[in-house]
Image: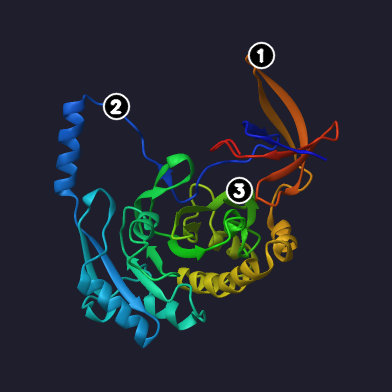
């Protein structure tokens, strides 16, 4: 049957909560222009510089990290000052709740992804770091932060992310534009984490994380920046991975370093399947983790003649080849559903 592309807003019958368990959006306020500019200027002057620690898994990758520091080529958005160090140059001891680079590198077994690490105790956004510096850092590099104060989400949402979350972004390069939208769907969530299409992660009916992929096209290649946020330790305001784990076993907790290395070890394997064989071999694995099989959805379509919204009920069947939702109406008509930002 003909697949109709319905670029319309739609919402789900299921009342799925949209609270990001380890983040909260900034409150937006409108000020007088002169006051706003003065306030922004004062904040820029008082904003402390951000620390970025560079490291590589192998000796050659450590040399690459060294050249990044020596060339002073890395930058942050909004002219936030950046201080870069190599891990061996760090004299202070890591705090107990800071990301342990040695633990992470010791468990990493990839050949490409995650081997160049940019870590910071506090950053505006890991996604901005890899996006702004994409041409400076090797493909597969990852930026990890303990705290984000200007994290990025869908529809230009901005988030604060306190300690307790695994917050990271990494770079991917692809040539086939047909599979670029599907890269955000590969990976195996830990525990019983489920996927709420297109990019939210849920546990026990509550949101514990999300995924954001952005891309640019240059020299016949797609430069993809993939960002992941996962609540590992913060039980409030919703739940966390370790809160769920405590219900299953005692005396063991997930560490961010182990989750990050395990993610890249598995992602690299699945990414090669995606590139060489397409998404079809991964579909069954994906559908086992998602929330939407057989789900009934209300689709709102604007009537051009009468300027009215017409509602139709459809049933989710799966994904289309381009990565959107495939649904069937009660009439038997097939539909391709696109997200409208935040309502799904």
Q: Which residue is mark 2?
A: 30
Which of pointers 2 and 1 lies earlier in the amino acid sequence? Answer: 2
Q: Quadrant of residue 339?
A: top right
Which x, y percent locates residue 241? 55, 61
Residue mark closest to the camera, 1 vs 3: 1
Where 223 falls versus 238 (above or below)?
A: below
Which of the image's four quarters has the C terminus? Answer: top right
| Real-space CA distance between mark 2 and mark 3, rounded to the nearest whole angstrom | 32 Å
Q: Is residue 119 left or right of residue 248?
A: left
Query: Residue placed at 38% from the left, 56% from the top?
Result: 131
Where 91 falls versus 6 (above or below)?
A: below
Q: Which residue is mark 3?
A: 198
| Real-space CA distance between mark 1 and mark 3, rounded to the nearest whole angstrom | 31 Å
In the drawing, what numbered circle is on residue 305?
1
SS label for mark 3 = loop
SS label for mark 2 = loop
Query: Residue placed at 59% from the left, 41% from the top?
Result: 17
Q: Quadrant of residue 265?
A: bottom right
Which of pointers 2 and 3 lies earlier in the amino acid sequence? Answer: 2
Residue mark closest to the camera, 2 vs 1: 1
Q: Quadrant of residue 282?
A: bottom right
Q: Is residue 94 left or right of residue 239?
A: left
Query: Residue placed at 23% from the left, 77% from the top?
Result: 90
């Amino acid at each position: 049957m003909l697949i109709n592309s319905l670029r319309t807003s739609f919402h789900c019958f299921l009342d799925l909560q949209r609270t990001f368990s380890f983040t909260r959006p900034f409150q937006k306020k409108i000020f007088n222009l002169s006051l706003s500019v003065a306030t922004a200027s004062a904040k820029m002057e008082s904003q402390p510089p951000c620390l970025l620690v560079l490291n590589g898994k192998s000796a050659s990758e450590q040399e690459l990290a060294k050249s990044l520091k020596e060339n002073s080529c890395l930058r942050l958005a909004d002219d936030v000052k950046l201080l870069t160090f190599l891990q061996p140059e760090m004299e202070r001891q890591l705090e107990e709740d800071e990301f342990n680079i040695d633990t992470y590198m010791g468990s990493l077994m990839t050949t490409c992804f995650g081997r160049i690490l940019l870590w910071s105790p506090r950053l505006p956004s890991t996604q901005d770091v890899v996006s702004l510096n994409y041409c400076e850092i090797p493909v597969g590099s990852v930026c990890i932060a303990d705290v984000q104060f200007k994290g990025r989400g869908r529809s230009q949402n901005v988030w604060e992310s306190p300690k307790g979350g695994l917050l990271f972004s990494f770079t991917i390069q692809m040539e086939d534009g047909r599979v670029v939208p599907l890269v955000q769907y590969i990976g195996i969530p830990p525990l019983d984490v489920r996927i709420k299409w297109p990019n939210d992660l849920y546990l026990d009916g509550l949101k514990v994380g999300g995924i954001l992929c952005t891309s640019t096209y240059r020299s016949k290649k797609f430069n993809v920046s993939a960002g992941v946020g996962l609540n590992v330790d913060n039980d409030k305001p919703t739940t966390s991975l370790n809160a769920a784990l405590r219900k299953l076993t005692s005396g063991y907790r997930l560490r961010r370093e182990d989750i990050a290395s395990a993610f890249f070890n598995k992602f690299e394997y699945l990414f090669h399947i995606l590139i060489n064989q397409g998404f079809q071999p991964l579909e069954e694995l994906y559908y086992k983790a998602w929330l939407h099989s057989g789900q009934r959805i209300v689709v709102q379509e604007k009537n051009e003649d009468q300027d009215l919204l017409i509602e139709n009920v459809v049933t989710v069947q799966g994904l289309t080849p381009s990565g959107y939702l495939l649904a069937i109406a009660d009439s038997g008509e097939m539909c391709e559903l696109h997200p409208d930002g935040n309502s799904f």
